[in-house]
Image (cartoon, rainbow, N blue to C red):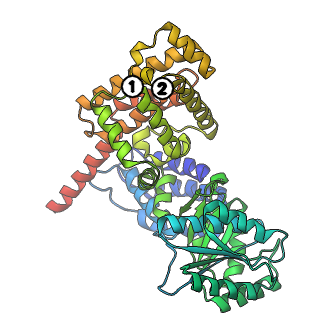
């Protein structure tokens, strides 16, 4: 998401490097490009205009921060304004001590309301220890209530059916009563939609809202419809009074105009974004983290949360111990591949790392798919080895290689390549350990990821070779460490003053 805007903003801000002081001419040139980038990203015209003027007021005539480059000052200003544009801080769902807390899910037909209802319910159960109950009041669309039942079963939450009635008000009253009787603290109401906005739909939503007094009314919109989603949100907000927005299909929206416009237009924040078809593919919307991704700063906090949620900490600590003591085997590597796959695609992970750590290098979704395929082949080769061979790779002679290649559907050359690159990775780990594993780890992280994992996944035609291999470990240009030193220098200077 935001790929097009991100590329244009990073290029514009990069062009400011080398300037001794920001002048009106420098600012005007940059702002013209920023305005065009926003408009091309389908951002609302008035929102783009106000954004540019706000950046201009803060940037014109500013002295360059001591110890920081001029373009970094502009990046900071643009980052602050982007964060504010999208809502400032994360907007969590607001719950009270009452039981149940009602959350209404509203939107047009086909926007993804039912799937989003299930995704949000699962997220609340996993991350906020809520006990949700789902109910559908869409009595018009064929099999809509059955669809919610299927979704509820898939995400492991309860659903209230009331098959004996087709009256929406009777259904919601029964659902509220059921939630109270059986101790559900959250009632998620999947409401009916239409192909277009009509008065009958709005009246029904107003009645449901008056009956259930929801703590949240979430408007679900397809992010790929851009400003149409914003206009629909305006109408729903005027009639029903929404408290937040859920944008679906954000993973397929390279522009991001709806996400950038909606808070300023309707005054209500984006609270969740759908980033895939799987039921766990939904994320809380953090404006500051999204702004970091757009400007190439990465999103390390989200990456950490992803790792903490999906990686077994004890296993990770044990693997780290083996790495630092030169005991890392092919068995361990196979286990590491399994954990790595839980985090998602390589392209997604690379976007979460700051450019200072990746050298600005990225891989496309197509290249990421090739990597995923290569990971499966690597696992197949290791799976074809015996446990003894995986823990003692030096015993793998010619006859064993022939058997492993035949069992994994690969060639002897591929088996040889895997073993050779495994040896190279072990050497790299030993070098990192001798240099202090955590000393300058920020600089080495990208090199370890690309040089170690990337090399092991196949070299040659493998797109991870584009990421720089082990060379990323050695370069210091614009590194995280050097930026950190400049920021510390700036802070010391301020203290002296």
Farthest-out residue, left: 496
Q: Quickly name the residue at label 2.
A: 456
481 with respect to 275 (left or right): left
**In the foreground, 60 or 433:** 433
Residue 446 visible in the displayed image: yes
- Residue 193: image x %, image y %? 77, 74
Question: Which secondary structure, mark 2?
Answer: helix
Q: Is residue 415 left or right of residue 76?
A: right
Label 2 close to label 1 by CB (< 8 Å)? yes
Q: Which mark is residue 490?
A: none
Give how far apart the Cα atoms at labels 2 and 1 are. 8 Å
The count of marks equals 2
Q: Residues within 10 Å of mark 2 (few under 14, many from 20)?
A: many
Badge 1 density bin: few <14, some 14–19, many ≥20, Cα 10 Å: many
Mark 2 or mark 1: which comes first in sequence? 1
Q: Is residue 91 above or below residue 239?
A: above
* Residue drawn at point x = 56 percent, y = 47 percent: 7
Q: Is residue 70 left or right of residue 247?
A: left
Q: Tell me the residue that label 1 is attached to.
A: 425
Question: Is residue 254 at least partly visible in the picture?
Answer: no
């Amino acid at each position: 998401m935001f790929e097009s805007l991100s590329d244009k903003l990073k290029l514009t801000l990069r062009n400011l490097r080398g300037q001794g002081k920001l002048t009106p001419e420098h600012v005007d040139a940059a702002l013209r490009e920023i305005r065009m980038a926003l408009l091309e990203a389908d951002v609302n015209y008035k929102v783009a205009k106000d954004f540019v003027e706000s950046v201009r007021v803060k940037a014109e005539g500013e002295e360059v921060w001591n110890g920081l480059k001029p373009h970094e000052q502009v990046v900071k200003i643009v980052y602050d304004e982007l964060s504010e544009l999208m809502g400032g801080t994360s907007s969590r769902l607001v719950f009270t001590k009452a039981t149940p807390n009602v959350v209404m899910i509203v939107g047009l037909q086909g926007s993804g309301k039912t799937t989003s209802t299930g995704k949000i319910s699962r997220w609340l159960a996993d991350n906020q220890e809520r006990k949700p109950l789902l109910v559908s009041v869409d009595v018009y669309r064929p099999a809509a209530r059955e669809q919610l039942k299927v979704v509820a079963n898939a995400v492991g939450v309860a659903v209230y059916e009331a098959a004996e009635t087709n009256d929406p008000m009777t259904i919601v009253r029964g659902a509220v009563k059921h939630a109270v009787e059986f101790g559900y603290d959250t009632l998620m109401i999947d409401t009916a939609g239409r192909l277009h906005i009509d008065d009958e739909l709005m009246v029904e939503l107003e009645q449901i809202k008056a009956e259930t007094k929801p703590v949240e009314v979430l408007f679900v919109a397809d992010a790929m419809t851009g400003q149409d989603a914003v206009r629909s949100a305006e109408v729903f907000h005027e009639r029903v009074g929404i408290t937040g927005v859920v944008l679906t299909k954000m993973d397929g929206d390279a522009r991001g105009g709806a996400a950038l416009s909606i808070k300023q237009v309707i005054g209500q924040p984006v609270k969740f974004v759908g980033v895939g078809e799987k039921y766990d593919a939904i994320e809380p919307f953090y404006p500051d983290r999204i702004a970091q991704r757009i400007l190439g700063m990465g999103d390390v906090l989200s990456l950490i949360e992803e790792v903490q949620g999906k990686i077994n900490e004890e296993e990770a600590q044990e693997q780290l111990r083996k790495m630092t003591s030169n005991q890392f085997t092919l068995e361990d590597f196979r286990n590491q591949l399994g954990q790595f796959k839980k985090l998602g695609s390589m392209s997604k992970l690379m976007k979460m790392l700051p450019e200072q750590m990746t050298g600005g290098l990225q891989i496309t979704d197509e290249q990421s798919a090739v990597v995923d395929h290569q990971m499966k082949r690597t696992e197949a080769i290791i799976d074809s080895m015996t446990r003894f061979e995986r823990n003692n790779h030096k015993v793998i002679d010619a006859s064993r290689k022939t058997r492993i290649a035949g069992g994994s559907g690969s060639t002897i050359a591929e088996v040889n390549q895997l073993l050779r690159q495994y040896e190279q990775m072990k050497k790299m780990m030993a070098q990192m350990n001798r240099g202090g594993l955590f000393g300058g780890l920020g600089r080495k992280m990208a090199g370890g990821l690309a040089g170690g994992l990337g090399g092991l996944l196949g070299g040659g035609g493998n797109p991870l070779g584009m990421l720089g291999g082990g060379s990323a470990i050695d370069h210091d240009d614009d590194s995280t460490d050097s930026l950190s030193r400049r920021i510390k220098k700036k802070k010391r200077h301020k203290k002296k003053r």
